[in-house]
Image (cartoon, helix red, strand yellow):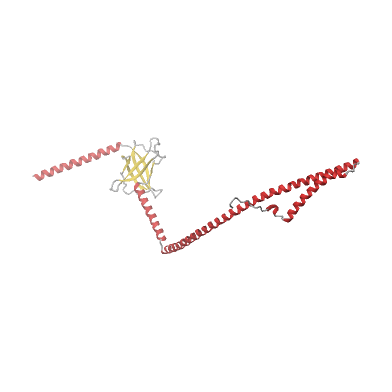
Amino acid sequence: MYNKINYTIVGVFVLLFSAGAIWFAIWLGKYDEKERYKYYKIYFTESVTGLTKDSAVKLKGVDIGRVESIRIDPNDISRVEVIVKIKEDVPIKEDMVAHLELLGVTGLQTIIIEGGSNEARDLVAKDGELPVIKSQPSWFYKTKSSITQIGQESSELLKRVNMLLSPQNINRFNELLEKAIVLEKKSIEGIDEAILMARDVRVSMKELKEKLEVSINNFNRIAKSISKDLKRVNKEIIPLIKRIRVATNNFNRAIVEIDRGLKRGDYNLKRIFDPLIVDLRLVTDELNYFIREVESSPSDLLFEQREIKRGPGE
């Protein structure tokens, strides 16, 4: 008897639960019929594994629609065409972008719409076509692509390293290293020779400097001596030249006076020639003395050695 009662209770509970589920499904269907949607296309170039019909479409974490259909684009087999329905009261802007996102560790994917600004225009379709929401690769796809690229670059790098470390290159490197060591030794020897040469040049330059200083001092002393001798020559020659010039002027003057005297009938030549003869005699004596001095020692005229006066005790 107790078993029959238990079966009756269980059966009633199952019937009530089934009726409630049916009623909830009918109510939910009626609610969905009241909702109005807009349809959009989204094209993905990556794999959409885990995305199914009725997968959620979210904007800033809020469910705004569902996936209506998924298929390969008949015009371009490199991408997937996804049609979504989004609530009519949700504005979709031209600057919004859609991407895929994994739901935890389940492997299922959802469509996330991001971006959008109030200033942007609403996304409007062309005549007879559905509006297309722009898409971008998901974080998982970017990471996978980056890892793949890193792997390829690493593989290429390893190949180049293997080529670089080939036995032939290692032998060449060893040869270059040996040549570099030899060249370094030669460079050190050359540097030592250059240092010694520089020292010799420094000593030679020092000696040359000392000799040059001595030569300059001697030249200065000779120049001073020449200057003094030239002054002495000037003192001796210039007066002689002046005397010759005076005698010449007097002689010319005497000729003029003789000519005038002859025209006047004055023939007293002794009075006219006496002063001229005296001047000519003096000039002739000085000129003869100067000529004898030059003939006896021409070098003394410019480089006459004078005895240096010494001080007391020298």
Place of residue 293 in the rendered image (x, y in percent of width and height, measured from the top left): 73, 53
* Quarter residue 167 falls in: bottom left
Whole-percent x and y of residue 20?
21, 39
Query: Left of 219 or right of it: where is 240?
Result: right
Is 172 situated above or below 143?
below
Which residue occupies the foreground of this view, 150 or 97?
A: 150
Q: Residue furthest left?
A: 1
Task: Give whichever of 145, 175 is nearer the camera.
Answer: 175
What residue lies at 72% left-to-right and 48% top-to-bottom?
236
Quadrant of the image occupied by residue 161: bottom left
- Residue 50 left/right relative to 242: left
Kindly identify the residue that appears in the image at 71 percent across and 47 percent down. Answer: 235
Quadrant of the image containing the N terminus: top left
Seen in the picture, residue 196 relative to 115 is either above or below; the reply is: below
Q: How many marks?
A: 0
Please give left or right for residue 10 compared with residue 224 in the image.
Answer: left
Q: Residue furthest right?
A: 265
| Viewer-closest of 86 and 202 | 202
